[in-house]
Structure formats: structure tokens, C-alpha cells
Amino acid sequence: MRSIFPATDLTTDAFKGKKVVIVSVPGAFTITAISDTYAKWSESMGLSVDLTEGGMGVRSARYVLILDDLKVVSIEREPGRGLTNTDADTTLSKL
């Protein structure tokens, strides 16, 4: 698998040689989190959801990405509402 972070991205140095968990939690309570404006990063990986009909546009889906030394080792996406694939116990079991 290839790295999802370009070589010029600051996260490359921060994540290299480490196990990293990236959690996408779309919603109103994430305003202080790192933003994926217009869900472009998520969309590039097929991890977005189109809620245009509901007036919300394209948004990041709820997912967990686990990286090990810049390689994606696990991607879990929620199929709908609720937590079945991205809850803490499931995520921790993959580490």
C-alpha cells in the first residue's frame, strides 16, 4: 500500500515510524478538530457521503483509519447511523 500523505505534508514527519489512528467524526461538535473542508481528503479515499438531498452537501463519512509507519493497515467505515465498525473497542482490537 502507498502512503496516503504526500511527501511534502507535515504529517509525514510526525507519523513516520508510528502507529496512528485517524478518526473521522462528522458533525457539529467537531469544530476544534482538524478540518477536512468540503470532505475533499475523505472523498479522495472513497470515504465521503453525499447528503446533498438533505441540504448538507458532500461530507466526510464516519470512519477510522489506522496507519503503521505511513501505511494504511485498516479502514473501517460506518454503513449508516450508529457505531458498529468505528467504536472504541473495535478500533482498539485492531491495534
Image: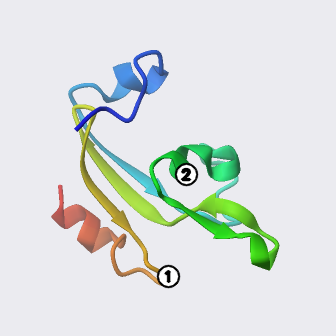
Q: Residue 43 carries which label?
A: 2
Horizontal relation, residue 91 to residue 27: left or right:
left
Classify mark 1: helix, strand or loop: loop
Residue at horizontal 27 percent and vertical 43 percent from the top: 67
Residue 45, placed above or below residue 62: above
The disc, 2 or 1, on the residue closer to the chain's N-terminal end is 2
Measured in 3D between alpha carbons, the distance from the residue under mark 2 to the one under mark 1, in whole angstroms, is: 17 Å
In this rendering, the label closer to the viewer, 2 or 1: 2
Q: Which amino acid does label 2 sit on?
A: Glu
Where residue 3 sits in the image (x, y, percent)? 31, 32
Q: Do the residues labelled 2 and 1 touch (CB within 8 Å)?
A: no
Where residue 30 sits in the image (x, y, percent)? 64, 58
Classify mark 2: helix, strand or loop: helix
Residue at horizontal 51 percent and vertical 46 percent from the top: 44
Residue 82, placed above or below residue 39: below
Quadrant for the C terminus in the image: bottom left
For label 1, the residue is 80
The quadrant holding residue 4 is top left
Q: Residue 55 carries which label?
A: none
Q: What residue type is labelled 1?
A: Gly
Q: How crowded is mark 1: few (under 14 residues within 10 Å), some or many (20 or more)?
A: few
Residue 31, placed above or below residue 1: below
The quadrant holding residue 85 is bottom left
